Image (spheres, grey):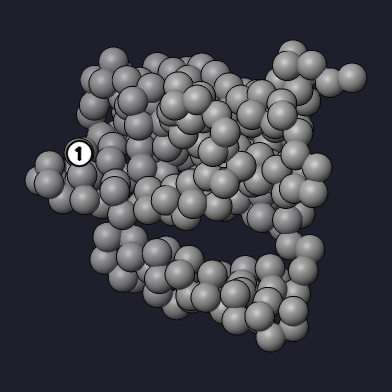
Amino acid sequence: MQTKLSAFWAGVRITAPLLLGVVPFALVYGVVVNRAGLPPSIGWAMSQIIFAGSSQLITARLVGEGTPILTIVLTAAIINLRHMLYSASIAPYMQHLSRKWRALLAYLLTDEGYAVGISHYVMYKAKPNPLSHWFFFGCGATMWLTWQIVTGIGIFIGGQIPASWGLDFAVPLTFIAIVFPALRHKADMVAAAVAGVVAVVAFAMPLKLGLIVATLLGIATGMLVEAKFK
């Protein structure tokens, strides 16, 4: 019989392999903070306040370039628009939770946590698991603790990491590892393919808008394919 603790540790275990990509991602952030000339305390505080790798990276870079604060805020908001899609997708499974639980899990929501969590929720769709939020909490807590520790290490030793290590390459590899196992149906595969192609073609769009366009077109295409072959 599953308990709160066993559900929590199940979330920890299933998230652990993804940390192989998260660790170098976090180190990259530390390097960027150093290069941007941000005080270590401010750079590390961003990990607790924002807790979003992509936004933290671009924010640190823009601060280092002396970009106006309004532009930085808008850019970070646009990059994080995908979290609205995540929230809309996972919200139906959390309606029964208290406001405190929903606020906590919303704070812990990441790309990796969402991918693992939504797969778990969908698996129990026909037979709801009352302890699923503890599983999701285990996923989020694992990501949060790892991110705080490794970004802290990266910030304080980032200046000593040679560029030849090529840590930046770990970022796309992490997302590939998240997405690929979830592509089980034709609609999923078509949506991923369209989003990938559009992201490359629209890469030069300002304020990272290419990612938003790719996301929306990928979702729309996937819905059309699913409706056609339903």
Find numbered disc 1 in the image and state the secondary structure of the residue it sits on: helix
Question: Which amino acid type is shown beneath numbered disc 1?
Answer: Val
**Residue visible at 33% across and 61% down in the picture:** 208
**Residue visible at 66% across and 80% down in the picture:** 227
Is any part of residue 170 visible from this angle?
Answer: no
Residue 23 % position (x, y): 58, 30
Q: Which residue is labeled 1 in the image?
A: 63
In the picture, measured across the screen, residue 211 lies left or right of residue 34, that is right
Residue 192 picture quarter: bottom right
Residue 88 % position (x, y): 49, 51
User: Which corner quadrant holds the N terminus?
Assistant: top right
Pick the residue in front: 157 or 216. Answer: 216
User: Which corner quadrant holds the C terminus?
Assistant: bottom right
Q: Residue furthest front?
A: 96
**Residue visible at 26% across and 66% down in the picture:** 206
* Residue 42 vertical position relative to residue 170 in the rendered view, above or below: above
